[in-house]
Amino acid sequence: MSAAPTADLAGFIARLQYEDIPAPIRERVKDYLLDALASALAGRQGDEVRQVEALACALGASREASVIGGGGLSLAGATMLNAYLVTAVTVCDVHRPTLYHTTPEVVPPALAIAERDRASGRSLLLALAAGLETSVRIALGIDYAAFRARGWHSPGVIGPFGGAAALGKLLDLNAEQQRNAFGLAGSQSAGTFAHWGTPTIKFHQCRGALSGLMAGLLAQQDFRASNEILVHPDGGIYNAYSNGGKAEVVTAGLGHEWLLQQIALRLWPAASSIQSAMTALFALIERHDLRPDEIAQVKVGLSKVVYDMHGTLPWNDKFKALLSARYVISIILHDRRCWLDQFEPGRYQDPKVDAFTHERVQTVCDPALQGTAATVEVRMKGGGSHAESRDCAKGDPDDPLTRAEIREKLRTAAEGKLPAARVDRIIALVDRLEDVADVGELTAALRAAR
């Protein structure tokens, strides 16, 4: 194991070139970018967006950076607001082994700097690959079980590192500057699960993105930080936030094994941990044409960690409805689809839906299940039952979303926010990102129509 994983990772990021990234990895990075843009457009419907937007406007008076589906704000304001938009309605990516949403902290600061500096699409793609790979490696190295046992939330702690790596490529930081950027990122790491069930749990993502932006910009000025923020014995991230971690993961196979491929995407809004149950239910609906009036009971089996977070949560507001396993299962059965309009008061307060959820949807903690694996058993009024189990969700690395599915997600999210022709242009620009001369073409397309 290296005694200096921070320096080793910084050196790799500083040396990384576009040609070093295999073509399949570059295409996957495009998928993550397109999905983040779709998630941000969907996020315009988040209940707290206006409050975060007010804060973003207060961070600076300039308007050089584009807001997705909005106008222009300062670098800091656009980074913070875009990051919140990506995560606002729980439809963004997730790195399941560490319950870490990666794109909200990496894509917004990279977009802001790429737009400001009129960077090429190739440069943006390189920056995103660097940021996502850094994020996953540092997250895996932290020993998540010990980290989580201390109450820490990954996006706020790890997120600044991903943003700092992306900025490092766009700002052409050398190895020493990149190491300082990581030190500055780690000095801003924060966020705990004490906020679970409140919008502040999502604020960690936008604060992490802003921290990455500041870390990169300050490191560009040769501002000095710790030589070893990850494993320093006195306050290194892995020692302060975990039990020493597994630092060897940070640099193992760098440049040969791309761990960013572990990032999962979500086809539907709702908590990432209940997507396997949703996947199972959609399979049953397709196979057996299930109708609520014909169902006596639905029993959903969840692992202990998922049950504790989502199994008994009420659904009396949009945020909780998106996280409630019982409500999500119920509304999918009633509407045979899952999108944001089903998490508005008119649906979760519907007496018929509410009664069905209370009386006929049961969640149980199944000790045989691990991680996000789930079982769904539907008992019919006329006798008989149907069951489906899923070890992973649609969108996970073992069952990934296709580019076509992500495009459709973007079109759905953009409905009523951007003209269809503009959405087609966004898709075309991301598809050929390596040929785009100026990222400003993409950010201009992302702005709301006047």
Image: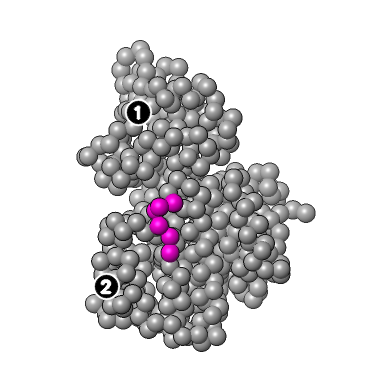
- In the foreground, 366 or 354: 354
Label 1 sits on residue: 362
Front of the two marks 1 and 2: 1
Q: Which amino acid does label 1 sit on?
A: Gln
**Residue range corresponding to the magenta coloring:** 190-195
Q: Classify mark 1: residues with Cα within 10 Å, few (<14), some (14-19) or many (20+).
A: some
* Residue positioned 31% across, 81% down in the render: 4
Helix, strand or loop status at disc 2 = helix
Give residue 442's quadrant in the image. Answer: bottom right
* Residue positioned 35% across, 28% down in the render: 362
Q: In this view, does 386 lie to the left or right of 185?
A: left
Helix, strand or loop status at disc 1 = strand
What is the number of callouts on the image?
Answer: 2
- Measured along the vertical axis of the image, is residue 221 above or below residue 391? below
- Measured along the vertical axis of the image, is residue 70 above or below residue 394? below
- In the foreground, 146 or 269: 146
In the displayed image of the protein, which residue is found farthest to the left? 368
* Residue positioned 33% across, 42% down in the render: 308
Q: Classify mark 2: residues with Cα within 10 Å, few (<14), some (14-19) or many (20+).
A: some
